[in-house]
Image: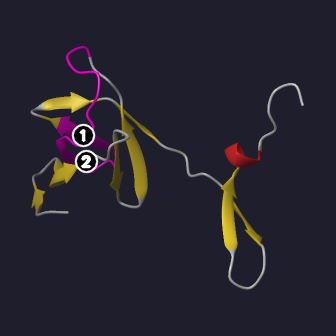
Amino acid sequence: MSSVKRTKHAVYDTKYHLEGDHTISYMGRKYKILSTQTRFGFAKAKVEVHKHLDGSIHIFYKGEDLKHELVPEQEKRYVSFGRSETFHFSKKDMALPVGV
């Protein structure tokens, strides 16, 4: 994270690095950056996040306001296989293959 700046319209943090899966974690939530007409992906890009006073966030790359979506949290289930081994599975991991 970096410095926080304030204007009369927004409070924003600067210079976040996107993960390799085109996501950013901001304020405990994960957002996925969608592709644009000029760029297909934003993996590892440096972006600026603006949080407006109405609670909305805007993510900018080189001045361009990027479209993004909130990534839903996956429910995790924990299975214990003894004292020292614990594994976690998401709903996707526990789904049966088609035709079974």
**Dot 1 and dot 2 residues touching (CB under 8 Å):** no
| Residue 42 sits inside the magenta stretch | yes
Q: Amino acid at mark 1?
A: Ile
Q: Amino acid at mark 2?
A: His
For numbered disc 2, what is the local secondary structure? strand
- The nearer-to-camera label among 1 and 2 is 1
Question: Relative to the observer, which residue lies in front, 23 or 56?
Answer: 23
Q: Which residue is mark 2?
A: 52
Span of residues in magenta:
37-60
For numbered disc 1, what is the local secondary structure? strand
Of the 4 image quadrants, the one containing the N terminus is bottom left
Whole-Å distance between the Cαs marked 1 and 2? Answer: 11 Å
Q: Which residue is mark 1?
A: 59
Residue 11 seen anywhere in this rendered image of the structure = no
| Residue 43 sits inside the magenta stretch | yes
Q: Residues within 10 Å of mark 2 (few under 14, many from 20)?
A: some
Is 75 situated left or right of 100 in this image? Answer: left
Which residue lies at the image location 20% right of the left edge and 16% below the top edge?
Answer: 38
Residue 45 location in percent, x, y? 19, 40
Residue 25 falls in which quadrant of the image? bottom left
